[in-house]
Image (spheres, grey):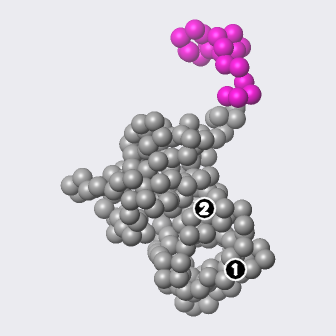
Amino acid sequence: MFTGLIEEMGKILRIQSNSAGKLFQIAAQKVVQDLKIGESIAIDGACLSVIESDSSSFTVQAVQETLIKSTLNFLKVSDYVNLERAMLATSRFGGHFVQGHVDGMGKLISLKSLGGSAEMSLVVPDELVKYIVPKGSIAINGISLTIVAVESAVARIALIPLTLTETNLKYRKNGDFLNIEVDLLAKYIEKFASRESISESKIKSWGYDSQNRKRK
């Protein structure tokens, strides 16, 4: 589990294809300080397992399914990626629940400055639009962000200055694809709603009246 608060940007040192997918060796400073073999780390929002680590870099394995569903397959040597280690039970929870399971890719169509902040617009895959609501949470390249508005399949997303300076969004341009993970809570609500027929009689059976007030 992750929070969507990026710890640092890493630089791709080496990419090697193998029978499982691709190996990525990534240079880093902060996350390698206590990184252990087998631990999970989010690379641009995709949760991968560490297979090698030293004082200045680490290597992860991405399987074919991850490469198909995420932008990791587009990465090149010297590209920068957002890094976040799995959260600790004792950590402050400053973002939102991020699993590191990329749901799809969105296409960046604008990134504009709004005084002290910025706003990003991207085209969201049709199957993910239903999970996106104004003021809701979304993870873009692993970053916990707030949705401003949704117009058809275009999501407008607020960015604070720190996000632009401390993540790889500052290197992205119109036409680039970004990893999307929708809010986990939205998925659970959809599953519950699809199984439960919500009606007035059902609400009353839960102990509420017609004004949705809990009966004593």
The x and y percentages for residue 165 are: 34, 69
Q: Secondary structure at mark 2?
A: loop
User: Mark 2 belongs to which amino acid?
Assistant: Ser
Q: Is 50 above or below relative to 173? A: below
The picture quadrant where one finds residue 17 is bottom right
Relative image position of residue 16 (x, y in whole percent): 66, 83
Quarter-of-image position of residue 115: bottom left
Amino acid type shown at disc 1 = Ser
Q: Is 158 left, or right, of 62 in this rendering?
A: left
Image: magenta residue range: 193-216
Q: Nearer the viewer, residue 40 or 210?
A: 40
Q: Residue at x 48, y 67 (%)?
A: 6
Say whether residue 200 is magenta: yes
Tell me, yes or no, whether the two marked residues, 2 and 1, touch with CB atoms within 8 Å: no
Rendered-image quadrant of the N terminus: bottom right
The residue positioned 60% from the left and 10% from the top of the image is 209
Q: Tell me where residue 204 appears, x and y as whole percent.
A: 67, 12
- Vertical relation: 174 (above or below) 188: below
Give the class, few, some or many, for how many residues have Cα within 10 Å of label 2's Cα (few <14, many ≥20). many
Q: Which residue is mark 1?
A: 17
User: Label 1 neighbourhood size at 10 Å, few (<14), some (14-19), many (20+)?
Assistant: few
**How far across and down, in percent of the image, does residue 110 sit?**
35, 54
> Magenta region's main secondary structure?
loop
> Which is nearer the N-term, disc 2 or disc 1?
1
Residue 204 visible in the displayed image: no
Residue 45 visible, this orientation:
yes
Q: Secondary structure at mark 1?
A: strand
Instruction: Measure the C-alpha gap from mark 2 to mark 1.
Output: 16 Å
Residue 175's mark?
none
Q: Quadrant of the C terminus?
A: top right
What residue would you read off at disc 2? 70
